[in-house]
Image (cartoon, grey):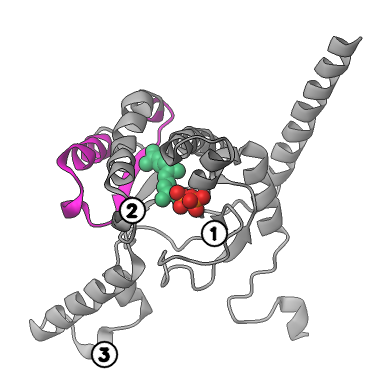
Amino acid sequence: MLNKMKLWKSQKKDIDFDDRFQEVLQHSIPHHIAIIMDGNGRWAKKRALPRVAGHHEGMKVVRKITRLANKLGVKTLTLYAFSTENWKRPKMEVDYLMKLPEEFLGKFLPELIEENVRVTMMGYDKHLPEHTANAVMNAMDATKDNDGLVLNFALNYGSRAEILDAVKNVLKDVNNGIINEGQIDEDTFSNYLMTKELPDPDLLIRTSGEIRLSNFMLWQLAYTEFWFTPVLWPDFDEKHLIEAIEAFQGRSRRFGGLQSEELK
Ligand code: FPP
């Protein structure tokens, strides 16, 4: 009897999930979802585990969420995996974080290729250890012709540095006569950012209950819908992503204008 109940409960959960999955597909799916994957350390601490155990568990969630995003038809998934400020962490933790892209891609690259995912990276790759940069470059190369989901890792990424570099490069191009001052508008400036080939995110998710941007995509998030959840990243699963997309679909995006009915 107990087993029957358990079975019914788990089937019910799947039915609920399938229904919600089908329902979100009836409405607009965010083209670009960006995620600040936070709370790995707290997840580990709650279990009396070393912080790196949280990062390792977080890596598994990356796979889960990538697969679902791809199934839903999301075009780009940007994941904040390491910031320009994260170098301040203990060396042991930094070294571990720098090994994760290799481990992840070592395990899942064949699956990503199979699922038509294209891996890209934004961030200061010159400062990454060679083994990390090589693993990412190899995955980028192996998936460059795929035209499904773009899985964009923000690795050694910092938005202020990105914006400052863009300003310097715009100045250089003006001084060299490549562009003139009158041509500097939002579109031109966006082309100097690391995201020049990507649309701005439609939905930003941050896990773990922190409500801040932590130097993430400050320019690109100007009109993005934000969704914050107390769930720690290693506990984040498919139903949480569906929940975030449901919330997104309930928002009215006006980009500073008015809805057509408000204009009447
Ligand atoms: C923030 O949590 C998380 C990070 C700095 C690292 C995020 C990295 C992963 C989830 C794995 C990435 C996987 C791949 C494939 C690159 P925190 O450590 O600040 O958590 P806390 O606030 O609870 O201490």
Q: What kind of residue is marked 2? A: Arg
Which of the two discs, 2 and 1, labels the residue nearer the N terminus? 2
The residue singled out by tag 1 in the image is 204
Would you identify the image quadrant in which residue 148 lies? top left
Horizontal side, residue 115 vs residue 109: left or right: right
Tell me: is circle 2 under 8 Å from ligand 1.
Answer: yes
- Circle 1 — which element? strand
Horizontal side, residue 212 vs residue 184: left or right: right
Numbered badge on residue 89: 2
Residue 179 position in % (x across, y down): 18, 81
Q: Residue at x 31, y 49 (%)?
A: 90
Which of the two discs, 3 and 2, labels the residue nearer the N terminus? 2
The residue singled out by tag 3 in the image is 182
- Circle 3 — which element? helix
Mark whose residue sits in front, 3 or 2? 2
Which of the two discs, 3 and 1, labels the residue nearer the N terminus? 3
Q: 261 or 185, which lies in front?
A: 185
Tell me which segment is drawn in magenta.
112-141
Up/down of 93 relative to 226, above or below = above
